[in-house]
Amino acid sequence: MFDTHAHLNFKALQDEVEDIIARSKEAGVHTITVPGTDNKSSVRAVEIAQQNEGIYAAVGIHPHHVFEEIKRFGLTIDYIKRLSVIISLLTKAKVVAVGEVGLDRHIYKNTKYSNYQINEEFMMVQKEFFSRQIRLALEFQKSLIIHNRETEDEILEILEAKWDPFFTKRVVIHCCEPSRKILLFAIKKKVFIGIDGDITYNPIKQMFIKYVPPELLVLETDSPFLLPEPLRSEKKFPPGRALWAAPNTPANLPLIAQFVADIRGEKLEELVKQTTENARTLFSIS
């Protein structure tokens, strides 16, 4: 199996990376893409990929972390300089994508940034970072991992404007919101739809998944987040950990796969085969 989105580079998992990879392989998950969300986590993603067989990296600036750029530089941002680390990483071995990048209007209750707020200046800078990173993906011939949260119309507008034939079957909308507009765009452009552990407890996503064509479906855990059922209800995580930060790992991908197969009325073996082939196509991994 192929987990297309697992943050093994995040602090919550940093002391267990080797064990997590070993347990994931025991569970049948032999290939993992680790996305960056800022410079530091992107560097770490590349390190993990280069040190472990079957692990690949994506590098990029997540829209949430664009807030740090606003705090430091206001609107006078030297985008070329601020993306210089990401640009340097795109030439490294086992870097298969730009990501996780995109747009985000969600107000986070758990964030390291004080006075975090969404305003149009912040969104303007998010859009500029996103647009420039789309260009980098095209320039360096990398796939694209897209984060979208509560920005359906805006993100589709940018993708339409920046679209290039190169991106056909090289883009995934990570943890895809259950949106008819996004699904129609994905079908039209042959964009992959990422499905995570929240499918096991989100009834709207459970309806949505039935309409995703099998050739556009990929599976993710978004580790360490989005612990799937039944582990979520059983609270299978250490005392003191908030539910949103429950230590999900790629070893739980089979739970997601089984749930998706059941709800779509498909055989598990066929779903695993199809989603693994889709993931390899997405990241151009033979």
Image (cartoon, rainbow, N blue to C red):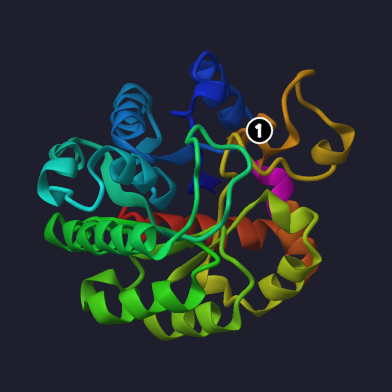
| Residue lying farthest to the top in this orientation | 15
Q: Which residue is drawn at 38% across and 45% down?
A: 67
> Measured along the vertical axis of the image, is residue 181 above or below residue 27?
below
All told, the count of numbered labels is: 1
Q: Position of residue 91 (x, y in %)?
A: 13, 41
> Which is more toward the observer, 82 or 16?
82
Q: Main secondary structure of the magenta part?
A: helix
Q: Residue at x 31, y 46 (%)?
A: 70
Taking the magenta stretch, the answer to whether it contains residue 279 is no
Residue at disc 1, secondary structure: helix
> Which is more toward the observer, 220 or 61?
61
Magenta stretch bounds: 253-257
Whether residue 15 is visible, yes or no, is yes
- Left or right of 74? Residue 185 is right
- Left or right of 187? Residue 203 is right
Q: In which quarter of the image is residue 183?
A: bottom right
> 10 Å neighbourhood of mark 1: few (<14), some, or many (≥20)?
some
Q: Which amino acid lies under the numbered mark 1 shown in the image of this protein?
A: Ala
Q: Which residue is drawn at 51% across and 72% down?
A: 215
Q: Position of residue 77 (x, y in %)?
A: 18, 49
Q: Where is residue 261 in the image (x, y as percent from the top left)?
A: 73, 62
- Left or right of 167? Residue 211 is right
Q: Quadrant of residue 253?
A: top right
> Measured along the vertical axis of the image, is residue 48 above or below residue 82?
above
Whether residue 286 is visible, yes or no, is no
Q: Name the residue under label 1.
A: 245
Q: Residue at x 39, y 65 (%)?
A: 120
> Measured along the vertical axis of the image, is residue 225 above or below residue 11?
below
Q: Where is residue 263 in the image (x, y as percent from the top left)?
A: 79, 67
